[in-house]
Amino acid sequence: MSNDYRRGRTAGPRKWHRSSADVRFRGFAVGAVIVSVVLAACTPGSSESPTPGQTASKPVSTDLGSDPVTLRVETDNSGSNQASLEELGAAFQKNYPNVTVDIITEQFTVLQQNGPRIISTPDTPDLIRFPTLGNTVKDGLLANLDPYAAAYGWDKFPATQLDQWRVSADGSRRGSGSLYGMGLSFSLTGTYYNKEEAAAIGMTTPPATVADFEALLAKAKAAGKVPLLSSGQDGNLFLIFQALMLSEGAKEQLSDWVFNEPGATIDTPEALDAATTLVEWTDAGYLPSDVNAINNTEAVARFNSGDAVFIYDGNWNTATYNTEMGENVGFFLLPPSSSGGKSSSMSDPFNYVIPAKAANKDAAAAFLNFAYTNEGRAIMVETTGQVPGGPADADLPTTGAGPVIQDTLTAFQQLNTDDGIAPYIGNATASIYTDTIIPQFQLLVAGKVSPADFVKRLQSDYTSQLAP
């Protein structure tokens, strides 16, 4: 889900920001890479043939030559996204002297609502922040990135980094098929903890199992502390629920559900167990009694003020925790149910696509690839506080980021090693987050609906919302 769903911006006129300098690109591998890949009928990573209009049937190249190129990159105008693209663009230009990068900024709601229209025009940008897939693959509006993935080695990245923007040739299913987008950085969810408060209840290292974590919650409650913060008003209780499902090994099950695989269901024993645990934690007083009245902004403020030992949240707030709490805040993934199990957590790419009508696809792909170099990864961390994409064995970026940001980087590296990235259930349908998740989780923790009826309602709403 990333933090896209949180941004309630008002649409306005398009704003243009221009920056230009010279650049020489260094590819994903050491040194300059010059590769041409001819687009074949069956693209790498898929047995499906793209429909007409999805790709241009000509070679792609990682050699940008020496002729002048103007690369137009469009992103939303939030502080972190705009700043990260500007810094990334400036660094890219220093590495490739014939390329000028023009950064175009727009309000997020405009990109969300008008993205298909923007990429269907003759003057489409070469690379664009693209929140919602919609029918763009089916309509042939996006470039197939499989040839670039083969040329740059993206197809060697952990599969779950790429699955969320793999799409079947008919555009009906996500999670498999050809690649149509790449994430320059990723959201990540997990448990933030107040180090002083955690030490006071005997926590010396992050818990190894969910049972260990539950024992810490009980100790915090017994000590008169608020054990675990969340925000029921805006639906963030689902993050805890989904993390509990993942701790039981339900990654494939959840991914199929979010990607709308035929026959996928969330009415499962793992979901029932997770819902039951969430109710038990609420009844035990591990969550605030007013959790349904708390939004994420207030939850973050309470945690920063020392009002709780733990908060389950996303790294869209890591920079705030880092600024407000400094050395006193840490981060860990919710552990598996059994000691030694693999890590899994929710994560979403801050995604960019290359329109099918883009004039400079090779330069756009080179720009994407630059984000996965050591220099590019460090820029993304320093400017966004998010975790960068790339190989599972890539060195962690060397930055001046605080310790909690380093914790998230280490956690994401472990997640990549375990291929444990899972999509957010809030993205399963266009309306399930607002119409189902927010109200149903509030009813669940308020004791107005049983765990069994709760998971049945999630599934029935999902089915009806996907109906033609």
Image: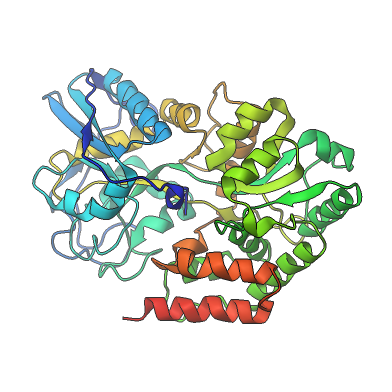
Q: How many marks?
A: 0
Which one is nearer the viewer's eye here, 250 or 146? 250
Q: How is the image coloured?
A: rainbow
Query: Residue drawn at (41%, 81%), measured in percent from left and top?
Result: 464
Query: Residue drawn at (56%, 59%), measured in percent from left and top?
Result: 235
Percent position of residue 205, x then y: 81, 41
Q: Quadrant of residue 173?
A: bottom left
Up-down relation of residue 143 to residue 401 (above or below): below
Which one is nearer the viewer's eye here, 50 or 377? 377
Residue 192 visible in the picture: yes
Percent position of residue 292, x then y: 64, 59
Up-down relation of residue 306 to residue 216 (above or below): above
Percent position of residue 1, x then y: 47, 54
Percent position of residue 213, x then y: 79, 53
The answer to whether residue 212 is left or right of residue 87 is right
Q: Quadrant of residue 78?
A: top left
Query: Residue drawn at (58%, 33%), measured in percent from left and top?
Result: 320
The answer to whether residue 321 is left or right of residue 352 is right
Residue 372 visible in the picture: no
Up-down relation of residue 434 to residue 458 (above or below): above
Quarter occupied by the C terminus? bottom left
The answer to whether residue 260 is left or right of residue 239 is left
Query: Residue drawn at (54%, 23%), measured in percent from left and top?
Result: 399
Residue at the extreme left of the image, as rendered: 122
Up-down relation of residue 439 to residue 227 (above or below): below
